Image (cartoon, grey):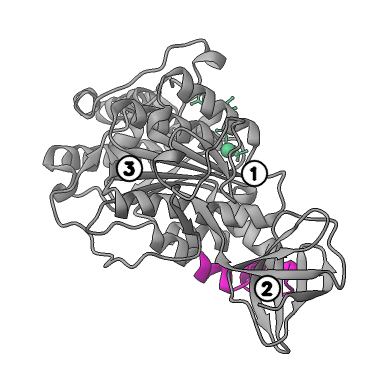
């Protein structure tokens, strides 16, 4: 294969001219630069031009440098060897421990979607108990389904996600993948330490592309992580839990890349192909005849605006969303779940059973009444309510307090022991 030559380096975008022998989209190219830059072919332009992403942000790239084809896509290690470890978007370990890379380590191209028949298992619905009352009751996790945790800055999305990973790892209900997209690197360390202390690393794998990194790894990290999850689902017939924090940052990173690639934005400032990209990612997070992927995705809400097109787009793919609210947090309730806006399409008799379903309908009714009574009380005071209304108002207040729960992952900062409730305990309590 004849090498190509760099014709332009502009920020993270590098143009490489080839003669006859054009690379493929998604192929990795090796620049013959002092830092041995890796280029990922993003698109092909006329005149045998490959438009590439400067994956490692190699600043030593220059015009006319030779670029060799690898004939391979971007591959990351998958399988047993990744369990209990932390990787970056390119499959390089981040935990400082040695990694025996060899021919025997299975690798997968992160852009390649496995051939699967995408059929849901029709067996009885499996409820995954989280031990967190408010989730198990209002937005229960079901095997193979997708849940969102949505909220503005600092309302507790990451803490709740970590608690879920902790509790699910502890109860041994599956293999968990944590994907950190565009968030704080410190949080990754905290999660690692918590899991290590609880001896729970054996059922987790973590992949990070964090906020201090350029948009390329922040986009690739989600694909790298889902590739490993697919491997365990298809080759090892495992049930997987896939946690992504934060899906909004994935869209944001894709948008930054589009700007660099000079694609034209439309809908609310987002470039249209981003939405099909997100759909592809969501479709890969699916179950088939081999195993299931259950996903929990956090969604950052910019300026607390739930109507942001990116937020709506992600929500559209989910079976339900746990809405975290600043108002609830200000009342000192943790987790700060907005009980009325939290919704799930999975709360049906067939999926959660008659008792749970009936209770949830009753609770919703009571909470709705509480909301309207609250505005009445603001005007006329609680004493003017009818005795029945007053009883309901108090009942609702007690119920709201009932969903307050101490977490294991905040034991240190709160100086309180974490609590776990079985589904039965939660339903009985309600
Ligand atoms: N359940 C909880 N119990 C006690 N404190 C909490 C809880 N949840 C959140 N907090 C407090 O709120 C802070 C912010 O929470 P967290 O980092 O989870 O927010 P976030 O929604 O992920 O924010 P961002 O949008 O910035 O990522 C935590 O550092 C912690 O101090
Ligand atoms: Mg967070």
Mark 3 or mark 2: name the one nearer the start of the chain.
3
Give the quarter of the figure containing the C terminus: top left
Label 2: how many residues lie within 10 Å, few (<14), some (14-19) or many (20+)? some
Does the magenta portion include 13?
A: no
Mark 2 or mark 1: name the one nearer the start of the chain.
1
Q: Nearer the viewer, mark 3 or mark 2?
A: 2
Does the magenta portion include 269?
A: yes
Residue range in magenta is 259-277
Q: Nearer the viewer, mark 3 or mark 1?
A: 1
Instruction: Specify the quadrant of the image occupied by residue 79.
Output: top left
Left or right: 239, with 263 as reference point: left
Residue under label 1: 210
Label 1: how many residues lie within 10 Å, few (<14), some (14-19) or many (20+)? many
Which residue is more in the foreground, 252 or 95? 95
Residue under label 2: 265
- Dot 1 beta carbon under 8 Å from ligand 2: no
Instruction: Specify the quadrant of the image occupied by residue 219.
Output: bottom right
| Element at label 1 | loop
Q: CA distance from mark 2 to mark 1?
A: 24 Å
* Residue 43 x, y percent position in the rendering: 64, 76
Residue under label 3: 139
- Residue 366 visible, this angle: no
């Amino acid at each position: 294969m004849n090498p190509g030559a760099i014709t332009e380096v502009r920020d993270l975008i590098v143009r490489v001219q080839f003669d006859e022998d054009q690379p493929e989209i998604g192929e990795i190219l090796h620049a013959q630069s002092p830092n041995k830059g890796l280029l990922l072919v993003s698109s092909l332009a006329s005149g045998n031009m490959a438009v590439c992403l400067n994956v490692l942000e190699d600043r030593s790239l220059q015009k006319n440098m030779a670029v060799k084809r690898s004939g391979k896509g971007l591959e990351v290690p998958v399988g047993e060897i990744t369990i209990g470890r932390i990787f970056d978007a390119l499959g390089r370990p981040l935990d400082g421990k040695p990694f025996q890379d060899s021919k025997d380590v299975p690798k997968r191209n992160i852009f390649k979607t496995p051939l699967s028949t995408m059929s849901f298992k029709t067996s009885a619905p499996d409820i995954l108990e989280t031990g967190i009352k408010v989730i198990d009751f209002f937005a229960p996790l079901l095997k193979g389904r997708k849940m969102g945790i949505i909220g503005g800055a600092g309302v507790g999305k990451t803490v709740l996600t970590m608690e879920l990973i902790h509790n699910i790892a502890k109860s041994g209900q599956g293999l968990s993948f944590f994907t950190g997209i565009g968030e704080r690197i410190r949080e990754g360390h905290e999660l690692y330490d918590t899991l290590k202390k609880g001896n729970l690393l054996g059922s987790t794998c973590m992949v990070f592309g964090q906020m201090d990194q350029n948009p390329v790894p922040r986009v690739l990290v989600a694909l790298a992580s889902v590739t490993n999850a697919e491997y365990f689902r298809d080759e090892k017939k495992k049930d997987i839990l896939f946690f992504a924090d934060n899906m909004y940052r994935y869209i944001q990173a894709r948008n930054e890349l589009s700007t660099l690639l000079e694609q034209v934005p439309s809908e609310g400032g987002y470039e249209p192909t981003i939405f099909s990209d997100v759909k592809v990612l969501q479709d890969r997070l699916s179950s088939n005849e081999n195993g299931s992927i259950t996903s929990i995705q956090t969604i950052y809400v910019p300026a607390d605006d739930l109507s942001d097109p990116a937020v709506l787009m992600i929500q559209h793919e989910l079976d339900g969303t746990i809405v975290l609210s600043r108002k609830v947090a200000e009342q000192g309730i943790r987790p700060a779940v907005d009980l009325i806006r939290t919704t799930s399409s999975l709360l049906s008799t067939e999926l959660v059973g008659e008792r749970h379903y009936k209770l949830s309908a009753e609770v919703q009714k009571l909470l709705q009444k509480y909301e309207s009574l609250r505005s009445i009380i603001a005007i006329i005071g609680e004493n003017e309510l009818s005795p029945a209304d007053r009883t309901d108002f108090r009942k609702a207040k007690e119920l709201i307090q009932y969903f307050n729960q101490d977490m294991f992952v905040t034991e240190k900062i709160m100086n309180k022991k974490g609590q776990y409730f079985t589904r039965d305990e939660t339903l009985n309590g309600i």
